[in-house]
Image (cartoon, rainbow, N blue to C red):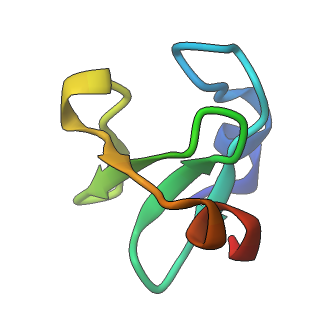
Amino acid sequence: MESRLLDILVCPLCKGRLDYDRPNAELICKADRLAFPVRDGIPVMLESEARDLDPAQAAAS
């Protein structure tokens, strides 16, 4: 995923910063503890598609 795209993408819920989890192909919002999938290089920024993270996973990302 391009770093320029990561610089402009924000969480659709809280508008906070996202971290890219390369091995799992997910964008992580630590504030909302959500992981948004990246499919075929395209971020899927829908709350209904996001995976909930437990507090330990959110802190580790």
Q: Position of residue 43 (x, y in %)?
A: 38, 42
Looking at the rendering, which quadrant does residue 50 occupy?
top left
Q: Residue at x 72, y 35 (%)?
A: 31
Residue 4 falls left or right of residue 23: right
Q: Residue at x 75, y 66 (%)?
A: 59
Q: Could you tell me residue 7's position as x and y percent?
A: 79, 38
Number of on-image labels: 0
In this picture, residue 46 sits left or right of residue 8: left
2 vs 32: above or below: below
Residue 21 position by quadrant: bottom right
When the figure is inspected, residue 52 is found, relative to residue 61, above or below; the finding is above
Residue 1 location (% of width, % of height): 54, 61
Tell me the residue at 53%/77% (across/down). 22
Q: Is residue 17 above or below residue 35?
A: above
Q: Could you tell me which quadrant the C terminus lies in?
A: bottom right
**x 34%, y 54%: residue:** 38
**What is the x, y in percent for residue 36?**
39, 45
Q: Is residue 55 toward the left or the right of residue 15 in the image?
A: left
Of 37 and 6, nearer the camera is 37
Most distant residue in the bottom direction: 23
User: Residue at the front extreme?
Assistant: 55
